[in-house]
Each structure stands twice: as structure tokens, then as C-alpha cells.
Image (cartoon, rainbow, N blue to C red):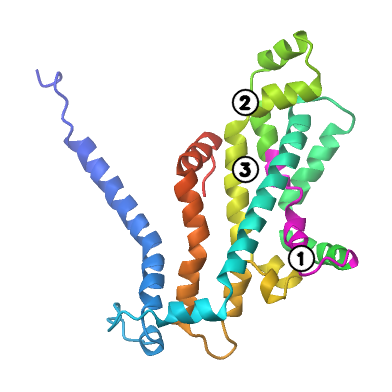
Amino acid sequence: MSNMFPDKTGGNKTDNVFFAILSVCALAMVVPFLWMILTAFKTTTEATSINPFVIFPGAWRTDSFFHVMQNMNFGRLYFNTIALIAGRVLCAVLTATMAGYALGRLEFPLKTFFFSLILVQMMVPSQIFIIPQYLMIAKLKMLNTMFALLFPGLITAFGTFLLRQNFMSLPADVEEAAYMDGANIGQTFLFIMFPLARSGIVALSIFTALFAFKELMWPLIVNTAADAMPLSAALAKLQGQFITNYPELMAASILACVPMIVIYLLFQRQFIQGVATSGGKL
């Protein structure tokens, strides 16, 4: 009779251990955000105090938020950041889907060579391309423009590789049926294969949006004008050489998180499905 009712105590203990580990990891990820929020409501003295027990502000002050909103044009910064994200996502989806489909489903001369170039570009640090890209933008006289921010993301090697793998995983029967019905390569790609690659496209859009939002070095190099910066570059300008007003920096960081929070709340279902079906992680 004992074999008919197995003891689940061991399983429950294992689940509790995993739950405890995940809780610690989640807490470690939440603590920086809590510190950012609490610091934004502190005074500069409280924020720079070395007393480890000064966690909560003595009085919840909102002066830092008013100061950064007066000194920084957040409307323009939000527009630049959203335009950067939308432009990078659009360019990545357009170029990566077509290149990924060609490399994954079509046969043409030097196909392996071109794919090897993409892999090499993924292996090389992106900082190597900064000087050539800057010289190209300078020769085009496009510094301090939105095009300068979008330029490195016009073509994405990572997106091409991701979409190539996604197209290769699709069944060949659907493509063959389209050819038998008289569809050409363009019609097959646009009306048949492109919709089937929706999970990979959503995953690429998520990664591209995150990379564009977090990018710091390139915007600081090509766009030095205050009205041409995205949020990441504008926040970097708040850090002084000798002293930094941490409450104002944290208040600006909270305001800078608003676009990504809104985007996630609007597309949280697509975020979860895209990451889960692509096998990637943020």
C-alpha cells in the first residue's frame, strides 16, 4: 500500500529550496530599483551618508523631480528616445527578415561566405566599428541628427542570425505549396513565411528596443547637442566631474524608465511570448 501513495515530502522540500533561491535572486534584482526610488526622495546629505542604517529618507522630498524637469527638456528626450527605439526596430525587422530569409531558405552563390561575414561581425566587439561609423556620419554632415542615432542599427548581424535560424525551423511543405500555387519568391516571403516568423520578429523587436534604450557610448559621441540626445546620454551628463547630485540623478533615472515601463505594460503579452518562443533571455 505504501507504493501506491508515494511520499511527496522530498519534492516539496526541493520546491521550497528552488523557491527560496528564486526569491533571493528576485530580491537582488529589485534592491537597486528600490535604492533608486528611495534616493530620489532624499537630500544630498542623506544620499551620500555612509551610515548603513539610513535607508529611508527623513522627509519625502520631491524637489529633485522638479529640478530635473526644469533643467532637462524631458519632452524632447522622450521623443528622441522613442524615435530611436521605433527607428531601430523598424530597420532591424526590415533588413533582418529579408536577409534571414535569403540565408535560411534560398540558394545563391557565396551564400556561406556572406553568412560567415555576419558571424565574424557578431564575434568582433562593437566598439571597433565606432570610429569608422563616426567618420561616415561626419562625412555625411549628419552629426546631431536622428539619422546619426539610427545609423549603427540600420543593419543588425544579430537579428539576421536570429531570423535565419527562425526561418530554417519552419516546415518546407508550406513553402513548396506556395510555389505550386504559383507564388514567386517575394509573394512566398511576404504572405507565407513572414507571418510564420512572427515569434522571431517579436523577439528581435524586444532585443532591439532594449539595446537601443540602453545604448550610451554612440549617442554621446555623435549627438552632443542637448536637444538631440536620448535619455541615456542626457542622464550621463548629470554626473559631474567632482560632485554628483544623486537625488536629482536618481529622480531623472526614474523619469527615464517611464517609456520602457509603458512599452512593457502595452506589449507585455508579446514580450513574454516572444522571449519564450525564441529561447532567448533578457
Q: Could you tell me which residue is drawn at 82 percent across and 62 percent down?
A: 133
Say left or right for 212 vs 248: right
Name the front one of labels 2 and 1.
1
For marks 1 and 3, the one nearer the N-term is 1
Which x, y percent locates residue 148?
77, 62
Which x, y percent locates residue 261?
47, 56
Pointers 1 and 3 in contact (CB under 8 A)? Answer: no
Q: Give the magenta part as a residue range.
A: 139-161
Pointers 2 and 3 in contact (CB under 8 A)? Answer: no
Give the residue type at disc 2.
Leu
Q: Which residue is mark 3?
A: 204
**Quarter-wise, where is residue 173 in the image?**
top right
Dot 1: element: loop
Magenta: main secondary structure: helix
Q: Which mark is residue 145?
A: 1
Q: Could you tell me which residue is drawn at 31 percent across and 79 percent down?
A: 60
Query: Relative to the observer, which residue lies in front, 220 or 79?
Result: 79
Give the residue type at disc 3.
Leu
Locate the N terminus by quadrant.
top left
Q: Which residue is mark 2?
A: 196
